[in-house]
Image: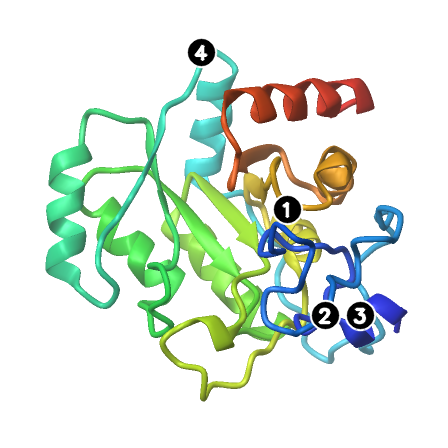
Amino acid sequence: MTTQLSECPKLMEYGPCGGVNFDGSCEVSPHACVFIETPTVRWHGVASETSPGVANPLPAPTASEGAVRMRELFATRQVVVADFPARALDAASIAECAAVLEGRVDAVLAGDAGTARVQFSPSYRAHLIQSSGLAVWTGFTCRDRNRVAMEGELAGLAHVGVAGVHCVTGDHTLTGSRPDAQPVFDLDSTEAASLARTNGHLVSVGESPATPPAERRPSRLLEKQRAGAEVCFVNHCGGVEAVGGFIRASWDLGV
C-alpha cells in the first residue's frame, strides 16, 4: 500500500481527485491533499490484484453494442454529448429529460445526481434512458462499490449496450445527503477505467484543468489514457483559457 493510498480519505492510488479545494486542501479532511506535492503516479496496474483464480471463471466480456456504434461515429465527425439533469430515483423525471433531448444530441452523460447519494443503479438508469431512444454515456463512481460489485455493474451496462462509461472516483460520502454511509473506494477512477475497458466499454474519465495541482492535470490524464480511457470530459474547467492550456499541454505529452 502506498503512502498516498493509506492517507487519502478516498484511498486513491492514482490521485489527486477533482475535489481538491482551490487552496490545495482535501475535499473532506483538514489537511492538504496528499497528492499535491508528489509526482504524478505512473500507471502500474490495478492495486492489490492478488485474488486467486476462481473455480468457475466468468465468460470473456463482449463489447457493448453502443460502444461499437459510438466509436464508428467518432471516426466520422464530432459528437455532441449533453448533460442529463434528471432527479435521483425519479423515473418520470428521467422520461421528461429524455423527451427534451431525443433527436438533438448523440448521447447523454447520465451520472449520479449532485449530492443525492441514493440512486438508481447505473445499468437500470441506462435502461430507462435508452428505452426513450437516447444513447447513454453512463456515469460510474467508485464511492459505493467494491471491485466485485463494479464488475457486475459493468457487465450489466454491456448487456444494456451503453455508448460509454464515464469513470470517476466520486465525491466522499461526507459531502452528500448520506454522511452516515461508509465510503468504499476499493478502486479509483484510473483503476475503474482499466476495469471498464477490459469489460468491453468505451471509457471516458474526468479531469479538472483549474483544480490544484493544475500543472500536473495533463500528466494525470496521460496515465488515465494508459489505463484504458479514450475520452475526457473536463470539470471545474476555469474558463476557455485554462481549458485551452490544458488541451495543449495534454497534446504535448501525447494524449
Q: Please, what secondary structure does the residue beneath circle 3 have?
A: helix
Query: Circle 1 sits on which residue?
Result: 197
Query: Circle 4 sits on which residue?
Result: 77
Image-based side of 199 in relation to 89, left or right = right
Residue 60, horizontal then vertical, whole percent: 64, 55
Q: Earlier in the sequence, mark 4 or mark 1?
A: 4
Q: Is residue 68 above or below residue 98?
A: above
Q: Residue at x 45, y 88 (%)?
A: 180
Q: Nearer the viewer, mark 2 or mark 4?
A: 2
Q: Nearer the viewer, mark 3 or mark 4?
A: 3
Q: Nearer the viewer, mark 1 or mark 2?
A: 2
Gap between marks 4 and 1 measured at Cα: 23 Å
Residue 170, horizontal then vertical, whole percent: 53, 61
Gap between marks 2 and 4 measured at Cα: 45 Å
Q: Earlier in the sequence, mark 1 or mark 2?
A: 2
Q: Please, what secondary structure does the residue beneath circle 1 have?
A: helix
Q: Amino acid at mark 3?
A: Leu
Query: Circle 2 sits on which residue?
Result: 31
Q: Residues within 10 Å of mark 2 (few under 14, many from 20)?
A: few
Q: Please, what secondary structure does the residue beneath circle 4 have?
A: loop
Q: Please, what secondary structure does the residue beneath circle 2 have?
A: loop
Gap between marks 2 and 3 measured at Cα: 15 Å
Image-based side of 185 in relation to 254, left or right = left
Q: Residues within 10 Å of mark 4 (few under 14, many from 20)?
A: few
Q: Residue at x 18, y 53 (%)?
A: 94
Q: Amino acid at mark 1?
A: Arg
Q: Earlier in the sequence, mark 1 or mark 3?
A: 3
Q: Nearer the viewer, mark 2 or mark 3?
A: 2
Gap between marks 1 and 3 measured at Cα: 23 Å
Query: Circle 3 sits on which residue?
Result: 5
